[in-house]
Each structure stands twice: as C-alpha cells, then as structure tokens.
Amino acid sequence: MKFKTLLCLVISCLCFVTVNAQEMSEEDIKSRIKPVGSVNIAGAQAASAAAAGPRSGADVYTKSCVACHSSGVLGAPKLQDAADWAPRLEQGFDTVLQNAINGIKAMPPKGTCGDCSDDEIKAAIEHMIEGI
Ligand code: HEC
C-alpha cells in the first residue's frame, strides 16, 4: 500500500515535469540554451549607436560634458561663456575639436563619451560655444 502511494506520487511528479517540458515554447528553450554572457565588441556598439542616428550636441553635452563644463571643474571652459572659450577658439576650431577627441590635460578623451562619434563631439562643442 505504501509502495503504491509512493509509486503514484513519483508517476504524477513525472507527468507534471513532462507536461511542463512540453509547455516550453521554442523561445523559452532558446533562451535557456543560449550561451552565457555575450561579447561586447566596441565597434559593434558604435555601429548600433550610429544606426539609431547621431545624438544632438545638446544631448551629448547633457549626458557627458555637463559634469565639468557647466561649473568649470578643473578649469574646463564653461557652457556658452565667451571669456572662457575665446582664447581656446583662437587655436582654430579643428584644433579644439582634436583636443576634445584626444583629450587635453584634465580633459579626458572624448570627455568620457567613449561611444560618441567625432561628429557627436563636434556637435557638443558647437552647442557649448553657441552664441559666442
Ligand atoms: C572630467 C571633466 C570633463 C568632462 C566630462 C569633459 N571635459 Fe572638456 N575639458 C575639461 C577640462 C578640465 C578642460 C580644460 C583643459 C585644459 O586645461 O586645457 C576641457 C576642455 C575642453 C575643450 C577645449 C579644448 C581646447 O583645445 O582648449 C573642449 C572643446 C572640450 N573640453 C569638450 C568637451 C566635450 C565635447 C565633452 C563631452 C563630450 C567634455 N569636454 C567633457 C574637462 C572635462
């Protein structure tokens, strides 16, 4: 009697598992057997960012530059502050752009926006010097 009860229990458990297995959709199975972790290739990420369209200068500024360039941290030229920007722009816009891309003194390369394209950095600078 006891054995039969146990057998019944085991069988019903097995049935439950089988039914469950059948209820898994193909999606579920794929997500279960997919490799753990995915490789993040820098170029691929940039390509997807580019696919979404370039960000505006104001967007890039707000996301990556504002921390230093709003209050002038470490001597960073402040947003739309002519006195701060004039001596820098005397070097020519291209030099200023190259300095922003490569980094200069306390200014990190691309202002920490690693996935920004050169054009997005350019747009951010244009936003910072707008009206000067
Ligand atoms: C960690 C702080 C920090 C961040 C973030 C930052 N900057 Fe700067 N930036 C600086 C500092 C400091 C300087 C002044 C460097 C110097 O002493 O000439 C500077 C200078 C510059 C200059 C002037 C370069 C020159 O030739 O004089 C440009 C252009 C610039 N930053 C653009 C950007 C842009 C665009 C971003 C955002 C994508 C950004 N920065 C983010 C700190 C920062």
Image (cartoon, rainbow, N blue to C red):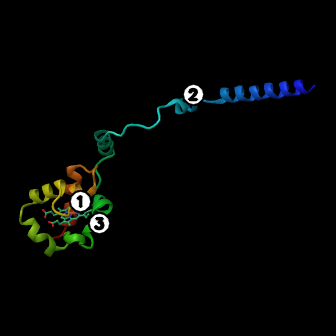
Residue sitting nearer the eye, 78 or 6: 6
Judged from the image, the secondary structure of the residue bearing numbered disc 3 is helix
Q: Is mark 1 within 8 Å of ligand 1?
A: yes
Which residue sits furthest front? 2
Separation (CA) of disc 3 from disc 2: 46 Å
x and y, in percent, of residue 98 in the image: 13, 55
Residue position for label 2 = 26
Residue position for label 3 = 66
Near mark 1 (Cα within 10 A), the count class, few <14, some 14-19 or many ≥20, is many
Judged from the image, the secondary structure of the residue bearing numbered disc 1 is helix
x and y, in percent, of residue 132 in the image: 15, 70
Q: Is residue 106 visible?
A: yes
Whether residue 68 sits left or right of residue 15 in the image: it is left
Q: Is mark 3 within 8 Å of ligand 1?
A: yes
x and y, in percent, of residue 82 in the image: 15, 73
- Residue at point 33% right, 60% down? 63
Residue position for label 1 = 124
